[in-house]
Image: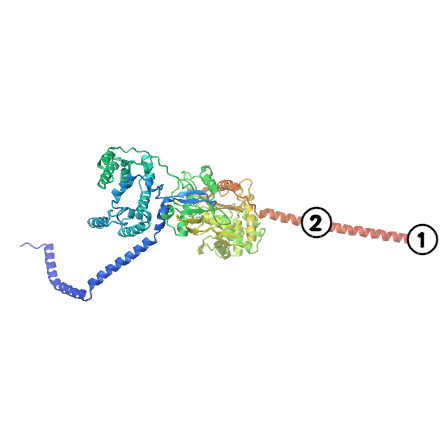
């Protein structure tokens, strides 16, 4: 007898094991039955299921009730519109939205084609169709838990398109059903059909039947033939597969199917269907996409602000017909965009990569953003916005915030003498260097500001205390970490960096008598029903320093553009205050920088501009300093903006003029005192001479009498 195989032996052992285990399993089974019966487990289990169903239903009902169903039609009819600071229309936002038309402007043939195909019992059900749900349930079982469609009425599809994601899940289908019931309570069937037809996607970037009719047949939705109407309805099943531009054969095949369904539903006769099937689909595209997104980076920032600050959703902003009022100045924005489109003003890397940039123009009184551009080249919707989202080192534009403002508050004057020496400071032996390698020994504060000299700034921060500068920078609205609490703060050495938006807001302090205005774009949002859902019309300001200190800082910062590093950035005929800044490269290129900044202002506008590369390396860096790279860009921006401002004059002169006047006054006073003294002593001398002459005459007259 051959030896048994391993598997045969294993089978025998498993049989023996089962024979041993079966009695125990039988006892356990009988025990479970007794316990199950004794404690009414069936009832408990049923009750638990009913409780889960009840809780789920209550939750879904809550979601449906909390959805803004009442404003659905108004939101679909209206396009979200952006308004500028003067309440003039500046553009529109839209995503899943086309040209809205009333139901009487849609061909009856198209209405019938859609109903016959998508929801033939549309006018009989109350938002959901039990037969359709049963069909979908059978499909769910047959396809092993996968939802393959079916069962959704037009009302449910409208609820999905308007309120929900496109994910095919049981929870989404349940939400869809409850929302459909709420929609049916609020609107008539004709309203629902009109909303559906205006909110459905028809391929090739068009939404709604009016734009679809223009896109495919060059006519209004009211003018469609039966054949054309059926082909438009055909697209709904799969816009990429059944649209007649890309797949004519597929479109005709499904058109013919829909015509047959229309006959079955008694919407047309067989003769009408045969006639329609014989007609070719003659395509004509007269659709014109309106480009309301004409200020792309400003609108991107606006959407981000609405989402981040006011908890709105992107899809709601784009689709619910809001009126969004902003601080936008369209002329400033056009001028700024024109500057960014002028390639001759910008540097390019050896491989042709363009330097990037970000810029913000702000109202110093309110913080409202007049204009904003966040990049160059092709714009990506809600892509990276360098005006608001970039975080780079600020360089010397940090000096007025971290050093000179707190120094003035501590009692220093604009002409106080500061040490300008190459030496180490503080417990960490921080040693700053001047860019040109020249050290003057002593330098007045205003000159250190004008020429952006590093060593005096660090010496002064060491004198007033790093903590004082650290706390003051935070008051300017610049976020810091504990790692920023060191002397390098004077030169803009930050852990996380700053954006042009943050720096524009910080410099409003000097233009606004010591008050910082928080930067913002939105002033008010009104929904489609007319309700104000965001009100930001009252400016938000915070006191950072005194008007006197702000005035002294402005006097020193005016000199940056008349005598210092910003001379090349000054438009002819204008007076500006502000600061330049640049950051060093980490690799050995002497005449190059990583980031370049200029922040400049008048009493009417603050402009903050940054340029640099998104990734700096040995082949991608800026030549020279800010006086060479960013200066012509800033000058062009300001030259376009300033003529359109009120051109309010500063309430002070530049520090160099003030000091010169002070010195001139001292000399003149000394001269006047000298002249007055000389005149006094001359009069005294004359008086003495007359007296002496008189007395001498009397003496000789007396002597003469005695000699007689």
Q: Position of residue 68 (x, y in %)?
A: 35, 51
Judge left or right: residue 115 versus residue 490. Answer: left
The furthest residue to the bottom:
38
Identity of the residue drawn at 37% across and 38% down: 289
Foreground residue, 12 or 233? 233
Q: Quadrant of residue 222?
A: top left
Q: Residues within 10 Å of mark 2 (few under 14, many from 20)?
A: few
Answer above or below: position of 541 versus 590: below
Residue 397 appears anywhere in the view = yes
Please tell me which residue lies in front, 493 or 506: 506
Q: Mark 2 or mark 1, which is nearer to you?
A: 2
Q: Nearer the viewer, residue 578 or 317?
A: 317
Residue 265, image x and y in percent?
A: 23, 42
Q: Secondary structure at mark 2?
A: helix
- Kindly report the distance in space between the C-alpha atoms of the residues bearing marks 2 and 1: 52 Å
| Along the line of sight, the residue nearer the viewer: 223 or 169 | 223
Residue assigned mark 2: 672
Residue 199 placement: quadrant: top left
Which numbered disc, 2 or 1, marks the residue that appears first in the sequence?
A: 2
């Amino acid at each position: 007898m051959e030896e048994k195989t391993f598997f045969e032996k294993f089978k025998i052992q498993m049989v023996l094991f089962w024979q041993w285990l079966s009695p125990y399993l039988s006892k356990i089974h009988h025990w479970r039955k007794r316990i199950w019966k004794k404690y009414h487990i069936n009832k408990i289990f049923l009750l638990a299921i009913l409780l889960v169903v009840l809780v789920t239903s209550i939750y879904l009902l809550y979601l449906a009730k909390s959805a803004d169903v009442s404003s659905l039609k108004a939101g679909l009819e209206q396009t979200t519109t952006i308004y500028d600071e003067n309440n003039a229309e500046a553009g529109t936002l839209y995503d899943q939205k086309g040209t809205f038309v009333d139901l009487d402007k849609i061909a009856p043939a198209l209405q019938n084609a859609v109903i016959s195909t998508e929801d033939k019992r549309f006018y009989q059900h109350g938002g959901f169709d039990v037969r359709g749900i049963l069909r979908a349930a059978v499909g769910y079982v047959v396809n092993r838990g996968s939802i393959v469609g079916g069962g959704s009425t037009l009302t449910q599809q409208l609820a999905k398109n308007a309120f929900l994601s496109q994910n095919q899940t049981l929870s989404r289908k349940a939400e869809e059903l409850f929302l459909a019931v709420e929609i049916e309570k609020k609107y008539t069937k004709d309203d629902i059909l009109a909303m559906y037809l205006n909110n459905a996607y028809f391929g090739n970037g068009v939404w709604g039947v009016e734009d679809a009719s223009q896109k495919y047949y060059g006519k209004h939705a009211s003018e469609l033939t039966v054949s054309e109407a059926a082909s438009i309805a055909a697209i709904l099943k799969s816009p990429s597969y059944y649209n007649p531009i890309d797949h004519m054969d597929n479109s005709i095949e499904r058109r013919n199917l829909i015509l047959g369904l229309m006959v079955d539903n008694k919407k047309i006769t067989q003769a009408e269907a045969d006639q329609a099937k014989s007609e070719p689909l003659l395509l004509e595209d007269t659709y014109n996409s309106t480009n309301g997104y004409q200020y792309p980076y400003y609108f991107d920032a606006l959407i981000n602000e609405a989402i981040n600050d006011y908890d709105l959703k992107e899809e709601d902003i784009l689709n619910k017909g809001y009126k969004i009022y902003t601080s936008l100045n369209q002329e400033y924005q056009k001028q700024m965009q024109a500057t960014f489109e002028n390639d001759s003003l910008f540097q390019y890397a050896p491989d042709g990569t363009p330097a990037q940039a970000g810029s913000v123009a702000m109202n110093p009184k309110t913080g409202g953003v007049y204009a904003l551009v966040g990049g160059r080249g092709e714009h990506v919707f809600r892509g990276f916005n360098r005006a608001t989202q970039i975080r780079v080192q600020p360089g010397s534009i940090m000096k007025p915030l971290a050093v000179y403002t707190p120094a003035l508050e501590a009692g220093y004057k604009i002409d106080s003498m500061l040490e300008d020496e190459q030496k180490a400071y503080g417990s960490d032996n921080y040693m700053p260097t001047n860019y040109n390698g020249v050290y003057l020994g002593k330098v007045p504060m205003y000159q250190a500001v004008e020429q952006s000299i590093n060593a005096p700034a660090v010496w002064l921060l060491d004198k007033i205390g790093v903590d004082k500068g650290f706390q003051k920078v935070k008051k300017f609205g610049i976020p810091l970490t504990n790692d920023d609490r060191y002397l390098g703060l004077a030169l803009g050495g930050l852990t996380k960096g700053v954006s042009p938006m943050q720096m524009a807001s910080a410099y409003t302090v000097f233009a606004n008598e010591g008050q910082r205005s928080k930067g913002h774009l939105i002033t008010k949002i009104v929904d489609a029903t007319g309700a104000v859902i965001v009100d930001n019309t009252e400016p938000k300001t915070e006191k950072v320093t005194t008007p006197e200190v702000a005035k002294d800082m402005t006097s020193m910062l005016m000199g940056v553009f008349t005598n210092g590093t910003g001379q090349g950035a000054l438009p002819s005929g204008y007076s500006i205050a502000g600061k330049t800044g640049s950051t060093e490269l980490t690799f050995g290129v002497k005449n190059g920088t990583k980031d370049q900044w200029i922040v400049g202002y008048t009493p009417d506008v603050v402009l903050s501009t940054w340029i640099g590369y998104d990734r700096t390396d040995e082949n991608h860096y800026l030549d020279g300093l800010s006086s060479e790279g960013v200066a012509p860009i800033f000058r062009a921006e300001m030259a376009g903006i300033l003529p359109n401002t009120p051109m309010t004059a500063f309430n002070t002169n530049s520090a160099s003029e003030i000091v010169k006047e002070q010195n001139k006054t001292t000399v003149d006073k000394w001269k006047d005192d000298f002249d007055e003294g000389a005149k006094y002593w001359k009069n005294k001398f004359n008086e003495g001479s007359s007296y002496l002459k008189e007395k001498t005459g009397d003496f000789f007259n007396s002597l003469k009498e005695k000699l007689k």
